[in-house]
Image: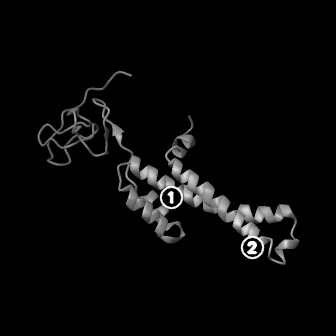
Amino acid sequence: MSRLREELRVIPRTAWILAIVGYLTVATLVFKFAVERDPQMSKWPLAGQLAFSYGLFLLFIAAMLLVGYVYGDAKRRGMRYVMWTWLALLIPDGIGIILYFILRSRLPKPCPGCSTPLKSGYIFCPHCGTALQATCPHCGQGVELIWANCAHCGTKLPTQPLRAA
């Protein structure tokens, strides 16, 4: 499955339905009551009238689906999805959506021991106790394997033996 399909599945079905129904309703109302009754636009060919009415509101469907994506994505990341959905809807000019993409959390990763989704930054799984990161033998803080000394307490770290490739 492609990455785009995976991300499109994040959008809830309700958002798809609302976006499509809203788009068709608004575009049809504009076509019936604005384009056909306007003296200048009524002279346009039918294809031009339809393209104007239905093409203009494609941005509407895109905006609705983006708000739906914010809802679904924030929910799967364990963020406050209702708050982010309202911010995406209410902050004008798409700024709420842009803020979401800038400030969103990382995706939770499954624990190698029990497969529970965990937010990044944990050193041990709170459910099963599996070590998720190397730790300092002195202070117990998380360390990187390439470090020579602990960044938290300064203790000399044991050297890791090189693995054969």
Q: SS at mark 2?
A: helix
Question: Is 108 left, or right, of 141 in this rendering?
Answer: right
Q: SS at mark 1?
A: helix
| Alpha carbon separation for disc pair 1 and 2 | 28 Å
Q: How is the image coloured?
A: one colour
Question: Is 30 left, or right, of 84 in this rendering?
Answer: right
Three-letter amino acid code of the residue under disc 2: Ala
Relative to 53, is 79 above or below?
Answer: above
Residue found farthest to the bottom? 39
- Give coordinates of residue 105: x percent, y percent: 37, 52
Residue 34, numbered circle: 2
Of residue 73 and residue 130, the one placed in the foreground of this image is: 73
Relative to 71, is 148 above or below?
Answer: above
Three-letter amino acid code of the residue under disc 1: Val
Q: Are marks 1 and 2 in contact (CB under 8 Å)?
A: no
Of residue 111 and residue 135, the one placed in the foreground of this image is: 111
Q: Is residue 58 visible?
A: no
Of residue 103 and residue 26, the one placed in the foreground of this image is: 26
Taking the spot 11% from the left edge, 40% from the top edge, the residue there is: 138
Taking the spot 62% from the left edge, 55% from the top edge, the residue there is: 20
Question: Is 30 left, or right, of 142 in this rendering?
Answer: right
Of residue 63 and residue 18, the one placed in the foreground of this image is: 18
Quadrant of the drawing holding the N terminus: top right
Packing grade of label 1 (10 A; few <14, some 14-19, many >=20) is many
Residue 67, numbered circle: 1
Quadrant of the drawing holding the C terminus: top left
| Dot 1 or dot 2, earlier in sequence | 2
- Give coordinates of residue 110: x percent, y percent: 34, 36
